[in-house]
Amino acid sequence: MRSVMSVVCAGCVMASAVHAQDSLGNHRFALRDIFELQWAADPQISPDGREIVYARSRYDIMKDVERSTLWVVNADNGEQRPLTSGDARNDGNARWSPDGGRLAYVSNADGSSEIHVRWMASGVEGVVTHLEHGPSSLAWSPNGKWIAFVMFVPEAPASIVSLPAKPQGADWGPPTRYTEALVYRQDGGGDVPAGHVHIFVVSADGGAPRQLTSGEFNDGEPVWSPDGKTIFFSANRHPDGEYTPLNTEVYSVPVEGGTLRTLTTREGPDNGPAISPDGKMVAYSGFDDHHQGYQVTHLYVMNADGSSSRVLTPNFDRDLFAASWAPDGRGIYVLYDDEGDTKIGYVTLDGKVTVVASHVGGLDLGRPYPGGSYSMSHAARIAFTESDPDHPADVAVTSRAGAPAVRLTHLNDGLFGPGGKTLGAVHEMHVKSSFDQRDVEGWVITPPAFDATRKYPLVLEIHGGPYLDYGDRWSAELQMYAAAGYVVLYMNPRGSTSYGETFGNLINHDYPNHDYDDLMSGVDAVIAKGYVDPDQLYVTGGSGGGVLTAWIVGHTHRFRAAVVQKPVINWYSWVLTADVSEFGLTYWFTGMPWTQADTYMKYSPITYVGNVTTPTMMITGDVDYRTPSSEAEQFYGALKLRKVPAALVRVPNASHEISATPSHMMTKLAYVMAWFKKWQNAPPQTVGQQ
């Protein structure tokens, strides 16, 4: 604990030194403020469009976990009230009954996750399940009598040995783990348990649930047909599904029991089925799989029996997902990312796409990634999570009629409102890549009390994925750097999504490479503005951003210090140890590593570690199975052998999502800023062993 606190204090000292010339003082966003953040998730509008139930989330500073309770907000005037309360509970997955009279949700209020039903008029509620494992993906039947859900079903673990029984009370330690699976552990979940996720239905009045699907497959979210006789879902039920990770299909199963029916058969993902109001058509999203690194997800429709499938959006060059039919059946609502902005779109049955709302998101608190949700009333009034750079997700409401969206909640006004914390200003920018003059978008955050006549240090922060996008969204981590006095640059270099398939595939079988040129062009463009000190440049990023950070210090000496977070350092070792090994093998390379060792190593940052002189810190989670900690340790070991200044931070019990707990987010930021401070005034490095 002492070492953590010393680093936190070091970060505070650095921040004080950088912005000592302004008078904001305690009005800057600080590490402990992370615990004060609140955000809205999963807004569900009532069938009549008058009220919206949402999960109001916060951090529990005593237990270092996320907590959520349900609130209801008036869709017309923004008045709100709590539906559930309690300091140590998590409520979510709320769904209105078809008539709007009841609300089903999942809660752990009684110690285990169960389905609760609340009668909205009276406020009376009851627990309708007593399950062995937690339910999720609740869906009401059209007549309101049943609730479908998915739940993990355990199976006996595989074994090829039979050991003698141990004496009563004997302690032989934990059991030996045996597996024959390709994917035997998953990031954030540890060892994959024996069992699978299947679909159940339970009476809305309570009782024993009935299992609808079975087999050695994991089944997706249930969707009812309008007549209540059939449930649709997507899953990968292929016998070799481990080796074809994206090859999902749409299925249907009779609610009263019967043969499961396969509705799609093409190679590629078929996900998120949505049933038309008349029950005659199914919309879903997917693509024909050509084993490219990035492939645009289109919107499809087919008859309910799987016949006459056709793509609605063959020429729309953005990923469409989260389909939901308009109440009149004449079109389909979707989400899509466009140049770093998540939007709700409306797609006609002849494929025309129009924008309904922008700035959907705010659910990733740490960095400005996409992620949001929406729901629709019977009259096509839409509730959604709305975010801007100055606040995480709030609840907003809109409609296709063209009226502007109205933000209904302001959950962080106490933190960022008048008299509260001052945030950095976010500015959009476009640059031409030095490699091919291609347009690349980015954003600059200037510190609070910014003075363009001064010279500021700059942090280049790089997104992961690499097939993801940043945008003008909320970001606690980037705002923290700005509060510490840095100009922050974040970009969408080639390979980023939301710019079309061509732009995304510029790094197909060529990553990392010229995305480096895009990022350096952005740095040069900000320096040219005149307010950045070119001798005070710093770089960091996580996952794919960690890959590029390690690549950068192996290709240039212009950065004073770097922090490489949860990276891939050696593609050869990564593809054999990650929890997505088959995905990496199929979509990022064209053969086994032992047949293409030169290619794997060409794109591995470890190959260029002999060029590194930049002081470099590595940060990794102890139980990261997406980019295992051995990746960061390889780079650290090589740097130490070469006597390059280096440090290794191992976050205990942290998966790939290091910032999943608020204390880990705070600690990670403190270490990054302390490392930058350590080298702020240091002379250029002379490496002892080349």
Image (cartoon, helix red, strand yellow):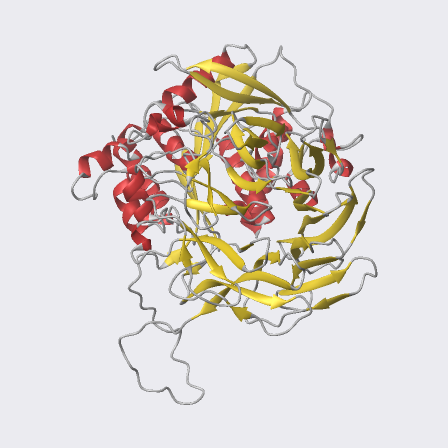
**282 to 344, vertically: above or below:** below
Residue 494 percent coordinates (x, y):
40, 24
Q: Which is nearer the eye, 534 or 13?
A: 534
Residue 126 visible to the viewer: yes
Looking at the image, residue 207 sits to the left or right of residue 436; the answer is: right
Query: Within the image, what quadrant is residue 131 found in?
Result: bottom right
Residue 542 percent coordinates (x, y):
45, 38
Say which residue appears at 28% left-offset and 43% top-offset.
585
Which corner quadrant holds the C terminus? top left
Query: Within the image, what quadrant is residue 615 found in?
Result: top left
Residue furthest bottom as drawn: 168
Residue 649 percent coordinates (x, y):
45, 45
Looking at the image, residue 327 sits to the left or right of residue 565; the answer is: right
Say which residue appears at 32% left-offset and 26% top-offset.
513
Residue furthest left as drawn: 595
Residue 358 visible to the viewer: no
Residue 479 percent coordinates (x, y):
61, 31
Looking at the image, residue 80 sits to the left or right of residue 477; the answer is: right
Q: How many marks?
A: 0
**76 to 19, vertically: above or below:** below
Q: Which is nearer the eye, 395 or 176?
A: 395
Q: Which is nearer the eye, 447 or 559?
A: 447
Q: Which is nearer the eye, 392 or 100?
A: 100
**329 to 216, vertically: above or below:** above
